[in-house]
Image (cartoon, grey):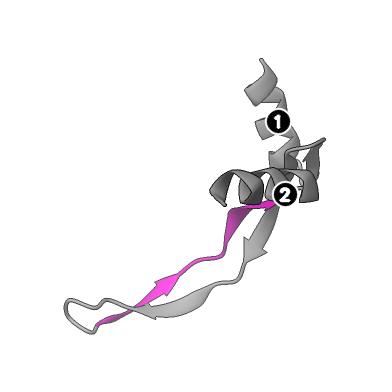
Amino acid sequence: MFFKEISTALMCGDRIELRGLGSMVVKKRAARIAKNPRNDHKIEVGDKGSLSFRPSKELIKRFNKVSN
């Protein structure tokens, strides 16, 4: 139920903030021309959404504390 609510909000274009963890938002990626590395053919890649996560300062601080 929790994940369904989050995914529904993201699909509607809302920004999700989880206190102490971070925030998520769907960013639009523009259409572009890409190259297939196997055969060098150019292909058109359509526009799409990409999920972006930004960790909170608290999460970064805790992670760096554990890493050191």
Magenta stretch mostly in which secondary structure?
strand
Task: Tell me if residue 29 comes above or below residue 1 in the rendering.
Answer: below
Q: Is residue 52 visible from the viewing direction of this image?
A: yes
Q: Quadrant of the N terminus?
A: top right
Magenta residues (range): 41-54
Task: Tell me if residue 2 comes above or below residue 8 in the rendering.
Answer: above
Using the rendered view, name the quadrant where residue 39 is placed.
Answer: bottom left
Query: Residue at image x 41%, y 74%?
Result: 44
**SS of the residue under disc 1:** helix
Which label sits on residue 61? 2
**SS of the residue under disc 2:** helix
Q: Is residue 24 visible from the viewing direction of this image?
A: no
Query: Residue at image x 63%, y 51%?
Result: 64
Query: Residue at image x 69%, y 41%?
Result: 11
Q: Is residue 44 magenta?
A: yes
Work out how far the residue at label 2 is from the one at label 1, CA to CA, in angstroms.
Answer: 25 Å
Which label sits on residue 6? 1
Crowd rating for badge 2 (residues with CA inside 10 Å; few <14, some 14–19, many 20+): few
Q: Earlier in the sequence, mark 2 or mark 1?
A: 1
Query: Residue at image x 59%, y 55%?
Result: 50
Q: Do the numbered discs 2 and 1 sit on residues whose CB atoms are within 8 Å?
A: no
Numbered-mark total: 2
Q: 20 and 65: which one is in front?
A: 65
* x and y, in percent, of residue 60 in the image: 69, 50
As drawn, the residue found furthest toward the left would be 39
Q: Is residue 56 left or right of residue 50?
A: right
At label 2, the amino acid type is Lys
* x and y, in percent, of residue 45 in the image: 44, 69
Crowd rating for badge 1 (residues with CA inside 10 Å; few <14, some 14–19, many 20+): some
Q: Nearer the viewer, mark 2 or mark 1?
A: 2
